[in-house]
Amino acid sequence: MRFIWIVVIVSLQLWANNSTKEDQSKQAIVKIYTVSKVPNYLEPWASSIRRSSGSGAIISGNRILTNAHVVANNTFIEVQRYGERKRYQAKVLSVSHQADMALLEVEDKQFFDGVDALELGELPTIEQKVVVYGFPMGGKTLSATTGVVSRIEHHRYAHSGESFLAVQVDAAVNPGNSGGPALTDGKIVGVVMQNLSKSQNIGYLVPVTMIKHFLEDIKDGKYDGFADLGLTTQKMENPTIKSFYHLDDNTTGNFVANLVYNTSLQGVVKKGDIITAIDGHKIEDDSTVEFREHEYTSFHHFVDQHQLGEKISLDIVRDRKRMKVEARLDYIADDLLLVKTTEYDMMPRYFIYGGYVFSPLSRNLLRRSSQNKLALRHFATQWPKEEKKEVVVLLKVLAAELNRGNYSFALWPIEKLNGKTFDSFDSFYQMVRDFDGDFLVLEDEDGARVIINREEALSQQPNILKKYNIEFDRSVDLRSE
């Protein structure tokens, strides 16, 4: 009988400890209210206002950890702690749109009174139980859902379009949960990021390893980002390609198909090399590495472990010879892409010339357009070249007398201006601005042309802007020149 009472007392103590821990965790959960200015990439001078809400968690240093997409394009942010009704004004301290993470700060330190900051845990294991906290749709109070970790592997982050390690859980995740923490034993193991549409209870977390990388990155007060190798590789699962390159059955790796012109791997790795290991970790023929026993993900996982500016080690096979090489990780994806990743917290770049609207091609523009522009989407798969670092498009034509007959031109990529190529939107703008001849001749890669009378364009421009109620003929970055 005495033994039974001891068991009961111990159980009650454990229950009380867990209850206290859970209550302390709840105190650190935050609801985030965001007002955003949403740019219109088809009408780059225009924008709209949107209100939304998300979740976050208080961590060390009186900071609030959340998703970047919860506060993207924000103009005003308020936060509210669990169990309280008062809202406090907040602002973004640092943001990684790449990895969909952000830190907020609150100037009024009373907001943090009586709360214990949540600590960061370790990368969870498969079947590990997690509790997801947040303020999802369907109510106004705190929601807690439990689930288990289903898998851990690289997944495309919807916010940036880049691929990083992600934790899949079966806990219910809904709009409003974004930015909320997933806890195990009261510690953060991930932040709710997104769910899989048309599925039941498949949600994704930004894993704690990515969070730690982000926090380490910004210790110097500046966000650098997650590095990119700047190369295209090919799997080597086909036995014929392995035979062609004289690889034995025990040698696995990836074939280097191409390198971007400005990658820091230039001169270190060559087209035709076979990368067999990264930082000593064997690369399988299917492009994966074992990051834990019996668990595999993209070999880019070991790139993501590094901070920008650090060195990475590669084992390669070149002309049947095995060697080790090292390279600095100096660039993120946006430094190495012809069409940059999705951008936030800025208005689109553009300028108008005689009713013709010009803009750089962006993923925001591709996502915004409902037109099936295969040629434009192809650009998004290409590496830049030294002579072509950015694509410029004739976005649309504002109908006026001088551009009659050209109204159908929209999202039209421009290859040449007066017979000369250009490498970027900036150089294209300078060429147009400095031109003092009679006619501007725009040409695409197939030779189709749009011809603009310079004198008429300049004289009719004010009336065209007034007719379409457009205040400025160029984006703010160009007005500052």
Image: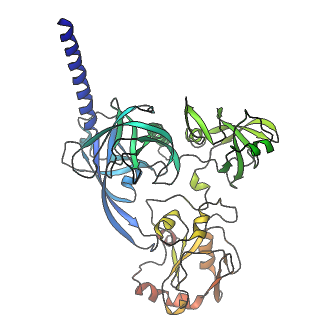
Q: Residue 186: horizontal and vertical position, in percent?
A: 33, 31
Residue at 40%, 54% (x, y): give it.
197
The quadrant holding residue 123 is: top left
Q: Which of 128 and 188 is in front in this view?
A: 128
Q: In x, y percent, where is residue 129?
A: 36, 32
Q: Which residue lies furthest to the top in this view?
A: 2
Q: In the image as oriented, which residue stretches furthest toward the front?
A: 239
Decide: is 21 above or below 112. Answer: above
Q: In this view, does 329 lie to the left or right of 370?
A: right
Return the residue nearer the eye: 335 or 429.
Answer: 335
- At 39% from the left and 45% from the top, the residue drawn is 203
Q: Is residue 333 left or right of residue 168?
A: right
Residue 372 seen in the figure = yes
* Colour basis: rainbow
| Residue that sits furthest to the bottom in the current view | 401
Percent x, y of residue 301:
56, 40
| Relative horizontal placement of residue 170, taking residue 336 as reference (left or right) | left
Report the number of numbered marks. 0
Q: Is residue 62 visible?
A: no
Asked if residue 123 is positioned above or below residue 143 in the image, the reply reads: above
User: Compared to 247, does 44 lie above or below?
Assistant: below
Query: What percent of the width, then of the height, locates residue 61?
Result: 36, 37
Name which quarter of the figure residue 27 lies in.
Answer: top left
From the viewer's perspective, tell me whether residue 173 is left or right of residue 474: left
Q: In which quadrant will I find the N terminus?
A: top left
